[in-house]
């Protein structure tokens, strides 16, 4: 087992990893930028080193500085968390070439699955359903038009690299398709340095459901059931839950088995998430695999009782998974709300600043993952996620009631947050009855 691990991240996920390592008897080395200097969560690491100025490109994303810090800190492994370098195949390769274990999949698997077009090809070979569309990358406008007429409008143009909705456009006729091709290609090139795009049938009013998997280096692959991530705004998740409401048991089982087949076909190890969309008829289609721990991993931990961060570390150390498929339960209902420092009433603009007053939620079945506190300064340089509120209850009705209560009693003063919007969503009859899709927020609150 590792003696020391460097955590190549910040905020709540860094704190989450520090805690897991502490319980496993593993020392931790933290990195921080000048913007995070003095942050209280860094006190939970055994050592902490500054890696550069506030901007992530000058600090957290500087691979040479992270590796140098790992060598100075005499660590045996690096845990990347999510975001930053977590899905950077080159960084994973550098780590291992420096004899430092990367807590995640191999760089070969990351490269394969990081290319959405290649991942779709692999999915087809593994008998995993994919959305009808182009067999490969689009070469020209004429090809795109021919495919669109064959499968029927509307169609979706997607970037082969990246995510988060960038490089993605919907086209409903020939004219909008021509425009969408140019826009998606330009956006993908600017965002990811890769302008490759492909086309698939646009699935209207879908649910977004993902399957958590874990695989070790001994050939063991398991799923840890699904999470429903349908509640989104512009492809950014707001609320996640498990089990997925309105999902038939046979569909759930088929999705979980398909996720395992895909991971086996990719020779994948460690934690990963296989994402699907489910149409109005209940058909599921693979869209991508996220080769890292997810923001919403606590949802799975609550229903299974399995610590995913500890499992990641065990697998990275070469240990076999400490559980088999039949050992993984799905108990009760878990819901997670992402709390962002944003102002929903003004187009979700970021709301950096000092938290003047803070009262965390609590009570039976409540978990609060965050690094914030009264006096903490929210930086304008990083993602606006500042906390995750998770509840676990016997039924979905109980879980919704518990989440409403927990959100209502929490106080975060000095900045704007998404809490008011989350409360509005939880109070709608459509959400309570599970009758939502990925466009629900934009349709319900178009302004």
Image: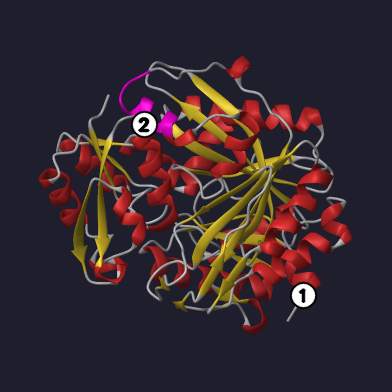
- Compare residues 125 and 29 and report the one nearer the observer: 29
Q: Quadrant of residue 170?
A: bottom right
Q: Position of residue 210 (x, y in %)?
A: 62, 42
What residue sits 60% from the left and 77% below the top?
348
Res 313 label: 2
Magenta-colored stretch includes residue 187:
no
* Residue in the picture at 51% in, 57% down: 138
The image position of residue 304, as x and y in percent, is 62, 29
Q: Quadrant location of the N terminus?
A: top left
Side (left or right) of 414 relative to 16:
right
As drawn, is 165 to the left or to the right of 196?
right
Part of the protein shown in magenta: 310-319
- Few, some or many residues within 10 Å of mark 1 (<14, 14–19, 20+): few
Residue marked by disc 1: 445
Q: Give the mark nearer the N terminus: 1 vs 2.
A: 2
Residue 328 position within the rendered picture, expressed as x and y whole percent measured from the top left: 61, 22
- State the quadrant of the C terminus: bottom right
Q: Residue at x 38, y 33 (%)?
A: 23
Residue 128 visible in rendering = no
Q: Which of pointers 1 and 2 indicates the residue nearer the eye?
A: 2
**Badge 2, how many Cα within 10 Å: few under 14, some, many 20+?**
many
Q: Using the image as rendered, state which of residue 310 and residue 87 is in the foreground.
A: 310
Snapshot quadrant of residue 315: top left
- 59 shown above or below 314: below
Does residue 86 lie above or below 224 as drawn? below
């Amino acid at each position: 087992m590792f003696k020391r691990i460097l955590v190549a991240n910040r905020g709540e996920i860094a704190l989450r990893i520090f805690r897991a390592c502490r319980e496993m008897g593993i020392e931790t080395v933290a990195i921080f930028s000048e913007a995070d200097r003095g942050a209280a969560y860094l006190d939970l690491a055994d050592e902490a080193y500054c890696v550069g100025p506030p901007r992530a490109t000058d600090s957290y994303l500087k691979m040479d500085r992270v590796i140098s810090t790992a060598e100075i800190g005499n660590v045996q492994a690096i845990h990347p968390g999510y975001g930053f370098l977590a899905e950077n195949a080159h960084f994973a390769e550098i780590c291992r070439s420096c004899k430092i274990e990367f807590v995640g999949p191999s760089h070969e698997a990351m490269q394969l699955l990081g290319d959405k077009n290649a991942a779709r090809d692999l999915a087809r070979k593994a008998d995993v359903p994919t959305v009808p569309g182009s067999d490969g990358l689009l070469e020209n406008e004429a090809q795109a038009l021919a495919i669109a007429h064959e499968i029927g409008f509307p169609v979706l143009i997607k970037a082969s690299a990246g995510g988060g909705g960038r490089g993605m456009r919907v086209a409903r006729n020939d004219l909008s398709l021509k425009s969408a091709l140019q826009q998606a290609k330009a956006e993908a090139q600017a965002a990811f340095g890769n302008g490759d795009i492909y086309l698939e049938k646009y699935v209207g009013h879908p649910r977004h459901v993902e399957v958590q998997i874990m695989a070790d280096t001994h050939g063991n692959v398991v799923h840890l059931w699904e999470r429903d991530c349908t509640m989104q705004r512009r492809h950014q998740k707001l609320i996640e839950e498990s089990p997925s409401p309105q999902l038939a048991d046979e569909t759930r089982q088929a999705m979980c088995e398909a996720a395992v087949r895909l991971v086996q076909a990719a020779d994948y190890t460690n934690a990963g998430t296989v994402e699907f969309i489910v149409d109005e008829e209940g058909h599921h289609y693979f869209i991508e695999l996220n080769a890292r721990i997810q923001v919403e991993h606590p949802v799975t931990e609550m229903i299974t009782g399995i610590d995913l961060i500890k499992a990641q570390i065990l697998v990275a150390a070469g240990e076999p998974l400490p559980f088999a498929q039949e050992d993984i339960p799905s108990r009760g209902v878990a819901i997670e709300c992402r709390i962002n420092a944003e102002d929903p009433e003004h187009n979700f603009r970021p709301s950096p600043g000092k938290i003047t007053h803070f009262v965390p939620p609590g009570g039976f079945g409540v978990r609060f993952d965050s690094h914030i506190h009264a006096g903490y300064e929210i930086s304008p340089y990083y993602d606006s996620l500042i906390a995750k509120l998770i509840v676990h209850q016997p039924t979905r009705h109980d879980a919704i009631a518990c989440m409403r209560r927990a959100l209502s009693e929490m106080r975060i003063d000095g900045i704007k947050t998404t809490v008011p919007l989350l409360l509005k969503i939880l109070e709608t009859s459509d959400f309570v009855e599970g009758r939502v899709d990925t466009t629900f927020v934009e349709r319900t609150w178009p302004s």
